[in-house]
Image (spheres, rainbow, N blue to C red):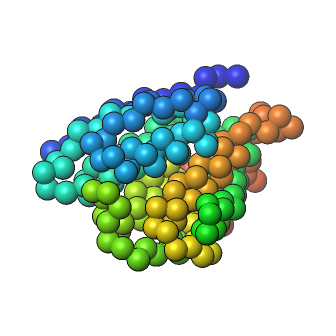
C-alpha cells in the first residue's frame, strides 16, 4: 500500500505552521502551538485516531489564540486531505460515542469532499486555561473545511467543560480512525457511486 503521509506548510502574516501526518501510524505526536490546552487536545486527536501528528505553530498569541487555533485546524485538515489522496479504499464513514465521566458526546463523519459542520455543544465558562471555549467550534470548522469532511458533533449531556471538549476531540479521533481505514474488500475502489470523492455535489456521492 502506498504510504499515506503528507506535509503541509502554511504561512500568513498571522501564523506559520508546519504539519506532518501519517494516516497509518500508531498515534505518535509532537505538538507545539504555544497554547497549552490546544496542544493537549491535538495530542488526544493523534493518540486516539492512531494518526501520527507533528505540528509546530508560531502565531500572534500577543493578540489572542484565534488565528493559531483556526490555522492549525486548516493545516491539519489540508494534510489529512493530501494524505488521503484519491480516497481509494477508505471506509469513508465513521462514528463514535464517547463517555468521559458525566459527559457523553456523539460524533459522526463522512469523508465526502463536502465540508460541513454541525456543532451542538455548549460551554458554561468562557475559558479553559488560556483558551476561549468559543474557539473549539472554530477549530472543528476549519479542520472539516480543509479536510473536506462532513462532521457532526453533539454533546448529549455534560457538566465539566474540560470533559465536554475532550470528549469532542476523542470522538472525532475515533470516528476519523474508522473512516480512514482501508476496507480490504474494496481497497481498489473509491467508496462512491460517482467514482470520486472531493468537490462533488451533494447528490453525487
Residue 104 percent location from the top left of the image = 63, 68
The residue at 53%/71% (across/down) is: 118
Say if 46 sits above or below 28 in the image.
below
Viewport quadrant of the N terminus:
top right
Apparent side of residue 201 relative to residue 162 in the rendered image (left or right): right
The residue at 71%/46% (across/down) is: 178
Query: Can see residue 74?
Result: no
Say if 198 sits above or below 107 in the image.
above
Number of numbered discs visible in the structure rendering:
0
Question: Given the current orientation, which residue lies at the most extreme right position?
Answer: 185
87 and 20: which one is in front? 20
201 and 27: which one is in front? 27
Question: Given the current orientation, which residue lies at the most extreme top position?
Answer: 2
The residue at 57%/59% (across/down) is: 167
Residue 147 percent location from the top left of the image = 50, 49
Residue 52 percent location from the top left of the image = 54, 31
Say if 166 sits above or below 9 in the image.
below
99 and 106: which one is in front? 99
Say if 42 sits above or below 184 in the image.
below
Viewport quadrant of the C terminus:
bottom right
Query: Can see residue 16?
Result: yes
The residue at 43%/46% (across/down) is: 40
Amino acid at each position: 500500500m502506498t504510504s499515506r503521509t503528507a506535509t503541509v506548510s502554511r504561512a500568513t502574516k498571522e501564523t506559520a505552521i508546519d504539519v506532518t501526518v501519517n494516516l497509518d501510524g500508531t498515534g505518535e505526536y509532537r505538538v507545539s502551538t504555544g497554547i497549552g490546552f490546544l496542544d493537549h487536545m491535538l495530542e488526544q486527536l493523534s493518540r486516539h485516531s492512531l494518526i501520527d501528528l507533528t505540528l509546530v505553530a508560531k502565531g500572534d498569541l500577543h493578540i489572542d489564540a484565534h488565528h493559531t487555533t483556526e490555522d492549525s485546524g486548516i493545516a491539519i485538515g489540508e494534510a489529512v486531505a493530501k494524505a488521503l489522496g484519491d480516497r481509494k479504499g477508505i471506509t469513508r464513514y465513521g462514528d463514535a460515542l464517547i463517555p468521559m465521566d458525566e459527559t457523553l458526546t456523539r460524533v459522526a463523519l463522512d469523508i465526502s469532499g463536502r465540508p460541513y459542520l454541525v456543532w451542538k455543544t455548549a460551554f458554561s465558562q468562557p475559558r479553559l486555561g488560556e483558551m476561549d471555549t468559543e474557539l473549539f467550534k472554530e477549530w472543528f470548522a476549519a479542520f472539516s473545511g480543509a479536510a473536506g469532511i462532513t462532521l457532526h458533533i453533539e454533546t448529549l449531556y455534560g457538566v465539566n467543560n474540560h470533559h465536554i471538549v475532550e470528549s469532542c476531540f476523542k470522538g472525532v479521533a475515533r470516528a476519523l480512525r474508522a473512516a480512514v481505514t482501508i476496507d480490504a474488500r474494496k481497497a481498489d475502489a473509491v467508496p462512491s457511486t460517482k467514482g470520486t470523492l472531493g468537490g462533488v455535489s451533494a447528490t453525487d456521492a
